[in-house]
């Protein structure tokens, strides 16, 4: 089957990229086993690639605050669904499944987070994220008060809003350039891995 394009814009060859971007992509490939298409598509504009991933990492990899990695990815998946972003729902839904270890959760929150099997805290978080996504002009102190009741402080609330806003931009870029999700994302975290047995084939060293 002929491979479908991952973006309507030119996708540079990894070997032709600036050294810092090439090293980042190869590091991701080594860790994940494949290169998420967002890295290849955004490499079309190196300066914007660097700015995008710097802000992404500041929001999604920070070690301060009370938001877990699963909760951060839940925000992305829920609000990306509101923006009809196929790439981000599929890619970040996979991360929700992996970090939460709940195979059904990503699908539930992408369709309707208020019917999902989540805690009241998570529901309050996602309610606020959706409000920021769709009607940020209506956010007021009552929203902060409700989130405070669920244990979020003002810095956590900033994180929720910033993640929502950043991925609102990402959603629009991905949709505009017709960015295609990697096939690998669709199956990640769908079912728990069975414990290996003596009958299973042994891994073959790569070198």
Image (tube, rainbow, N blue to C red):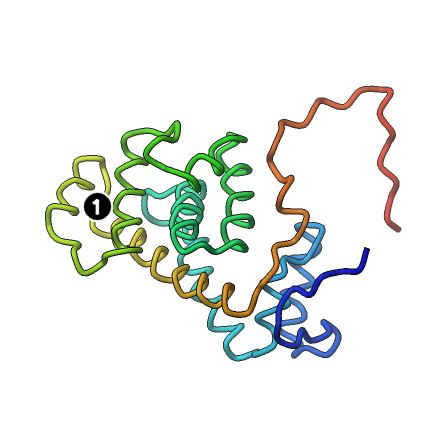
Task: Read off the residue under disc 1.
Answer: 153
Q: Is residue 165 left or right of residue 16?
A: left
Classify 198 as above or below 4. above
* Nearer-the-camera pick, 154 or 40: 40
Q: Is residue 28 left or right of residue 128?
A: right
In this orientation, which residue lies closer to the viewer: 149 or 58? 149
| Image point (61%, 55%), residue name | 181
Where's residue 82, x and y in %? Answer: 38, 51
Q: Residue at x 70, y 23 (%)?
A: 194
Q: Is residue 53 left or right of residue 127?
A: right
**Residue 188: percent from left, percent from top:** 63, 40
Measuring from the top left, give residue 189's x and y in whole percent.
60, 36
**Which corner quadrant of the image does residue 138 belong to?**
bottom left
Mark 1 is surrounded, within 10 Å at the Cα level, by few (under 14), some (14 to 19) or many (20 or more) other residues, namely some
Q: Residue placed at 60% from the left, 65% from the top?
A: 39
Q: In this rendering, is residue 53 above or below 201?
A: below
Badge 1 marks a residue whose secondary structure is loop
Please state the horizontal and vertical placement of residue 24, each as a whole percent of the image: 62, 65
Check the image and report above or below for 140 versus 42.
above
In this view, which residue lies farthest toward the top?
A: 198
Identify which residue is drawn at 20% across, 50% down.
154
**Left of 184 or right of it: where is 126?**
left
Q: Nearer the viewer, residue 6 or 43?
A: 6
Quarter holding the N terminus is bottom right
């Amino acid at each position: 089957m002929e491979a479908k394009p991952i973006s309507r814009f030119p996708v540079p060859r990894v070997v032709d990229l600036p050294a810092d971007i090439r090293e980042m992509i190869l590091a991701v490939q080594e860790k994940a086993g494949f290169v998420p298409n967002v890295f290849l598509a955004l490499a079309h504009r190196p300066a914007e690639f660097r700015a995008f991933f710097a802000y992404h990492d500041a929001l999604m990899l920070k070690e301060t605050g009370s938001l877990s990695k699963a909760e951060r990815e839940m925000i992305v998946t829920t609000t990306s669904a509101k923006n009809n972003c196929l790439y981000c729902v599929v890619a970040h839904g996979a991360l929700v499944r992996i970090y939460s270890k709940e195979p059904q959760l990503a699908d539930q929150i992408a369709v309707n987070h208020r019917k999902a099997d989540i805690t009241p805290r998570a529901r309050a978080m996602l309610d606020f994220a959706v409000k920021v996504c769709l009607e940020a002009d209506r956010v007021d102190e009552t929203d902060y008060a409700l989130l405070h009741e669920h244990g979020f402080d003002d810095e956590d609330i900033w994180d929720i809003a910033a993640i929502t806003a950043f991925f609102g931009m990402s959603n629009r870029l991905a949709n505009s350039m017709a960015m295609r999700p990697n096939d690998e994302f669709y199956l990640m975290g769908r079912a728990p891995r069975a414990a290996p047995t003596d009958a299973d084939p042994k891994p073959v060293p790569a070198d």
